[in-house]
Amino acid sequence: MQPLSFKEYLDFIESYNPNNLNALFEDYLEYGGLPTVIELKDHPDTIGPFLTGIYNTVLLKDVVQRNNVRDATLLESVLKFIAANIGSTVSTKKISDYLTSRGRKTTSETIDNYLKMLENAFIIYRANRFDLKGKLFLKTLEKYYIVDTGIRNQLTGLRNTDYGHVLENVIYFELLRRGYDVSIGKVGTLEVDFVASKANKKIYYQVSATIIYNKNKM
C-alpha cells in the first residue's frame, strides 16, 4: 500500500478552500500522504513523532528482523543517504565511498544487499536508466525514490531539501499509480527525468520546480 496521492489526500479533508490548494500541496510535500497525518494537522508537533514511529516500525520489523540484519545502524545510514539524494543518480560505490569517508567502512556488495532489502520492503523504489538511442537499460547510476515525502523529510530533518527533487519524487509515484513503468531517459550526456511506458504508449516527462524565461537568450 502506498501513501495517498494528492487527489486522495484532498478527498480525506472534509472541507477545504479550492483557493488554498497551493498551501495544501506544500503541506502534502512536507508531511507526506499517510492518512493519519491529516488527522494530526491540527497538532503539527505530533506529526514528527508519528512519522518516526512508522519509520522505526517498518525498518525494524520489515527489514532488520526479516533479513537478520547485523548492522542496523549501517542500514539506517544507507536509507538516510537515499533520502537526502532522491532524484539524483547514485551507485553502490558512491554510497559505499561516502559512508566510508564518514567512518562507516563498508563495501559495494553490502550496500547492494541493503538497497535490495529496502526495495523489497517497499520503502524505496528504483528507477533504472534507459538509453533512448541504444534502446537498452543501463546497469549503473540509477535513481531512487522514497515511498513517502513525510518520512523522507523526517529522516533528513528537512536538510538538503531540493524542492525540485521532492516534486520529482511525488510525480514518480503518481506515474506508478497510473500504471506506468517508469525509468530515466538518457540521450548522450542529456537526461529525460522520466520515461513512462504502458502497453504501446510512451510519454516523456521533464520535472522542474520553476521555468525561468530569459529574453536575452532568445
Image (cartoon, rainbow, N blue to C red):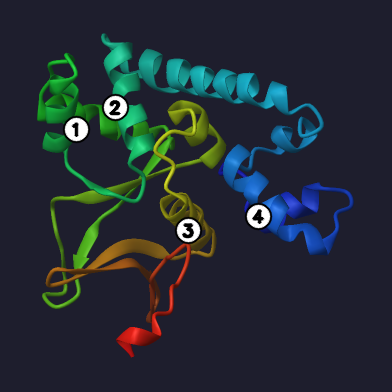
Q: Which amino acid, by three-letter code, is at mark 3?
A: Leu
CA distance separating discs 2 and 1: 7 Å
N-terminal-most mark, 4 or 3: 4
Q: Which amino acid, by three-letter code, is at mark 2?
A: Val
Foreground: disc 1 or disc 3: 1
On the image, the x and y values in percent for residue 82 come to: 33, 36
Asked whether the residues under the numbered discs 2 and 1 touch, taking CB atoms below 8 Å apart as contact, a structural biologist would say: yes
Is residue 218 visible in this depiction of the protein? yes
- Between 81 and 8, the one nearer to me in the picture: 81
CA distance separating discs 4 and 3: 14 Å
CA distance separating discs 2 and 4: 28 Å
Does residue 12 appear to the left or right of 173 in the view shown?
right
Quarter location, residue 68: top left
Quarter location, residue 196: bottom left
Q: Quadrant of the C terminus?
A: bottom left
CA distance separating discs 3 and 2: 24 Å
Q: Residue furthest bottom?
A: 218
Which residue is tagged 1? 95
Which residue is tagged 3? 176
Residue 6 badge: 4
Label 3: state its secondary structure: helix
CA distance separating discs 1 and 3: 26 Å
* Residue at 39% over, 13% down: 65
N-terminal-most mark, 2 or 4: 4
Residue 78 badge: 2
